[in-house]
Amino acid sequence: MRALQLPKLYPLTDGAHELMHAEQVARLCAGGATLIQLRAKHASPREFYAAAEAALRVARAHGARLIINDRADIALALRADGVHLGQDDLAPTAARRLLGPDAIIGYSTHNLEQARAAAHLPINYIAIGPVFATKTKANPDPFVGLTGVTRVRAALPPTLPLVAIGGITKENARAVLRAGADSVAVVSALLDEPELIAARTAEFWQSLEHERL
């Protein structure tokens, strides 16, 4: 399993957005995104596959990596760059057997106990969140705050990257990195205004340019 150096900005697509996933990926890439997660929580398997297939073509054309949310089977079928798994999804050990040693596998955690339990799994990064209140999930877990990010970072091996997600904006992202995250996963702050996605992504990158790796 290879070590992973995450970009500081990790955008996610939104299945409820007015733009198709492929177009979201195109605009995120135009703003400088290099690693994107495709998230389509309410799509049927057929719809999810079609959206991921189109989005992967766009990502490949821009030299970006695409991570599939939840669906290891679709990641395998499309030979995507990896999968991001939640607490109720396929176990990371099974996903690793399915996808092989080179796939990127991320894993969501929502508190210190879950993060500690995940530290020894065959994954490439851990996500912690929500950090702040978020509007992209109907029933979000309690937010952990900056203190929670710091505690999780301290409990993990230093070589295991930590992604922070939930309510992150250009205004608070630098504080999240300073709290211990290696990368910030962002949805609404980049996608809310479709015509500004590329510009917002570029501005977000610029705001993080001098922060810690």
Image: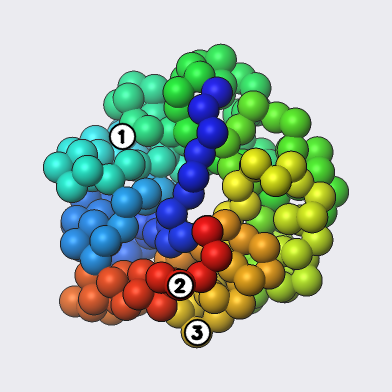
Crowding around mark 2 (Cα neighbors within 10 Å: few <14, some 14 to 19, many 20+) is few
- Report the quarter where the N terminus lies: top right
Circle 1 residue: 49
Judging depth in this view, the residue of 203 and 74 nearest the camera is: 203
Q: Quadrant of residue 119?
A: top right
Q: Mark 2 points at which residue?
A: 210
Q: Name the front one of labels 1 and 3.
A: 3
Q: What residue type is labelled 3?
A: Glu
Instruction: Report the residue marked by disc 3.
Output: 171
From mark 3 to mark 2, how far is it between C-alphas? Answer: 14 Å
Image point (66%, 56%), residue name: 128
Q: What element carries label 2?
A: loop
Going by the numbered disc 1, the residue's amino acid type is: Tyr
Picture residue at 79% right of the left edge, 55% below the top: 154
Question: 113 above or below 138?
Answer: above
Q: Few, some or many C-alpha atoms within 10 Å of disc 3 (few <14, some 14-19, many ≥20)? A: few
Furthest-left residue in this view = 61
Q: Residues within 10 Å of mark 1 (few under 14, many from 20)?
A: many
The mark nearer the N terminus, 3 or 2, is 3
Q: Is residue 145 above or below residue 56?
A: below
**Circle 3 sits in a helix, a strand or a loop, which is it?**
loop
**Of the image marks 1 and 2, the number of the one nearer the N terminus:** 1
Please name the amino acid that badge 2 sits on: His
